[in-house]
Image: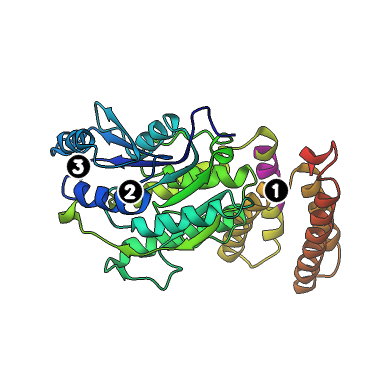
Amino acid sequence: MPLESSKALSIVIPVFNEINFLNKLFEQLKLYFDKKNIEIIVVDDGSTDGSSDLLKKIKQNGKYNFSFKLIKLDINSGKGKAIQTGIKNSKGEYILLQDADLELDSKDAKEMFDMITSNEDIKCIFGSRYLSGKLKKNNYFFNNLVGKINSLIFNIFFSQSLSDVHCGLKILHRSVIEKIKLSVNDFGIEIDLASQIVRNNFFIYEFGVSYFFRSKAQGKKITWVDGLKSFYYLIKVRFFDNSTSTNLSIIYSSIYMAFVGSHFGMGLGNTLFIIIFFILGSILGIHFKILSSTIIFLFIFIGSLFGKGNGTTLAVIIFFLLGLFVARNSKKYFSKSNFNNYF
């Protein structure tokens, strides 16, 4: 529910050493969001390039209708920390997350706001740099590749179909914000946010946006180290930030799928299959709890009793697929019962 004395929209903007972009950023904000029911919350994340003084001047000039909150963090604490701080100080019914570096266009942000407010069924929209037919400038292949790989892994882990988990332009209804508890302080905030939204059963819509990549010389903050850390965060949010029952299901499913893998190949090939199926089992364990996993395992065990050699392998595959079918339908059947936590 909207807070008392709330605004229609809170725009949270983390800033760290963005002095070259701030004037133009506020020109865009004034063009598209200059209304009294909108608040701009800028969180200065320990800037050292004069951004702090420029933000104070912009605030003092006051040539805008929106409310402007300026929050100063004494030391650089990371994008995630700045976003968390901004959200905690927001009053809007909707919260828009936007970067200060002008890689993304405020015009797209306005279109996303108009879209989400015109449809009460939509609670969350992520911008996507890969969906649109809009103008783009991006000549950094490696960054682009890592972003797409991360989105693919996220989709596999969470049964989603997102094209761009890392896009910095997002808008959320307050009902979504009230359900999540962000904890990541650096660029991993994007993965943390997306995973918690999905866990709380909110559907993520996507909207194609323009993108103008900037180089390190122009102030780009994210590095290849952050790219590697993103893989860590993907593993963390999927396999460790779970309930006890889910973690037990992951262990259980990993073991029985390793058993399935033992029916494939010989020698080193057999070992590789065991490892691959062990990983596949960990993913199954995310989606199927102990009882539904047991159904799959029992079907696999029955299949292993049939045939010899390749015949056994085929039987195991067939019964595995049958087990998946039965387990999925059992999960649906018990989804609204007291046994839901076990299926």
Q: Is residue 181 visible?
A: yes
Q: Earlier in the sequence, mark 3 or mark 2?
A: 3
Q: Which residue is mark 2?
A: 99
Q: Residue at x 61, y 43 (%)?
A: 199
Total labels: the figure holds 3
Q: Are marks 3 and 2 in contact (CB under 8 Å)?
A: no
> Where on the picture, by quarter, is residue 139?
bottom left
Q: Which numbered circle lies on residue 253?
A: 1
Q: Position of residue 106 (x, y in %)?
A: 35, 55
| The quarter of the displayed image where residue 210 is located | bottom left
Is 82 left, or right, of 26 in this rendering?
right
Predominant SS along the magenta part = helix
Q: Is residue 124 left or right of residue 292?
A: left
Position of 165 compared to 343: left or right? left
Residue toward you, 71 or 243: 71
**Residue 105 is one of the magenta-drawn residues:** no
| Residue 127 pos. (x, y %) | 45, 57
Q: Secondary structure at mark 1?
A: helix
Q: What stretch of residues is rendered in magenta?
A: 247-256
Question: From mark 2 to mark 1, how far is it between C-alphas?
Answer: 41 Å
Residue 254 colored magenta? yes
Q: Which mark is residue 225?
A: none
Give the number of the mark in front: 2 or 1.
Answer: 2
Instruction: Give left or right: position of 47 versus 265.
Output: left
Q: Is residue 311 above or below residue 333?
A: below
**Residue at 59% across / 47% down in the picture?**
198
